[in-house]
Image (cartoon, helix red, strand yellow):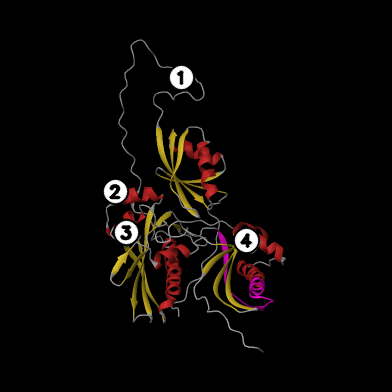
Amino acid sequence: MPFRRFSRPIEFAAALALAATGGLVIAQVDDPDQGLAPADSSGSFEIGGVEVDVTGKSAEAARLAGWRIAQRKGWAMLAQRMGVAGPALSDGALDGVVSGIVVENEQIGPNRYIARLGVLFSRAKAGAILGVTVGAARSAPMLTIPIEVSGGAASGFERKTAWAEAWTRYRTVNSAIDYVRPSGTGADGMLLNFGQTGRPGRGWWRVVLDQYGANDILVPKVTLRREWPGGPIIGVFEARHGPDNRLLTQFSLRVDRGDALPVLLDAGVKRLDDSYQAALRSGMLTGDPGLAFVAPVATPTPTDTPTGVIPIDLGIEGATPPTGTTSAVVTVQVDTPTSSSVTSSENALQAVPGVRSAITTSLAIGGVSVIRVSFDGDIAVLRAALEARGWSVGASGSTLRIRRGTAPGQGGQTATPADNSTG
């Protein structure tokens, strides 16, 4: 057998979206020196660790054949995980169900492809074929501020860090925690820095949480210790919660090489997510009463009525509301997987009678965006109007969380605990 030289293995997981034509879509940000790519909130079932070893007429043909085989194996593994006998699907049908391929490790030769892959399946399509529930009850929105301590310096969103990038890579669709993950652009570096996590003042935290459309705070922290340049790295991970930065759990992981830092951090994120979910189930992630919305005291403004003139309601649609009608400013959180969904959400809100304006104040493509709505009436009236239009609505003070086609309370996928060490 002739000797074949393979390219250097790709040691780190890279998410690659697989279109029906086999093309690649790579997430980017405008400025590579600032900000992170949008977090993956695509809502997919994920199957990892699919091994393939195939040959082909060319490197590209072998790789495509390997991805085809990974789809078939992944579909069988997904059905087994769900505890159902999934029907066999053709490659064409699988192309319509698979939403992405995750390259965990690959070696590419002139006509051979060896890889360990992950397969992402559309949650709605796969669930419908397998006949399983696709919804999941989640926590209140949690503003997530990853803190990295390296070389004695602690950073949040003041600068780009490997720890923040690890949280961006992590797919949270199967988690019971509703993470609000900022992109690190704009005012994020000023508002969400290391110093802010140590400030217990509830008033300022309420301002910050309202800006990002969240109800509570999570502070996942990692302290990195390097034995020598390029040598082993030890990460001490801490799961912290709330304005008082309360420690929930702590553990350590280690890798033997400096270039394996992303592997260490990815394993740490998975373990911390498991810890936060366990804390949620045990009731340890209850919200701080001091973070609850405080309604401003309305001061009545006296108005002069000209002598002999009595205001009357003409009953004309679009006329100025009569005296006594209240106007509210409501913060609306909505999932925006694509840029077009932002515009459609604004249009849907503006179509509700009584809405004066609907403006996006915090944009998160692939995550949760925040829209500020000016509404003539009580927030309960707006909530009822949205529910009548098919939205699922949750309320907390002056904040509404709206979703399309989500059935709260349904069961979801259970995360698999991570190993205690990586190498």
Mark 2: amino acid: Gly
Tell me whether circle 1 and circle 2 mark residues in contact (CB < 8 Å). Answer: no
Residue 194 shows up from this direction: yes
Range drawn in magenta:
43-66
Residue named by callout 2 = 203
Pointer 3: what residue? Answer: 193
Of labels 3 and 1, earlier in sequence is 3
| Badge 2 density bin: few <14, some 14–19, many ≥20, Cα 10 Å | few
Mark 3 or mark 2: whose residue is earlier in sequence: 3
Q: Earlier in the sequence, mark 1 or mark 4?
A: 4
How far is disc 3 from disc 1 in space, using C-alphas? 52 Å
Q: Which residue type does callout 4 highlight?
A: Ala
| Three-letter amino acid code of the residue under disc 3 | Asn
Residue 312 x %, y %:
43, 17
Residue 19's mark? Answer: 4
Instruction: Judge by depth and name the residue closer to the eye, 296 or 366.
Output: 366
- For label 4, the SS is loop
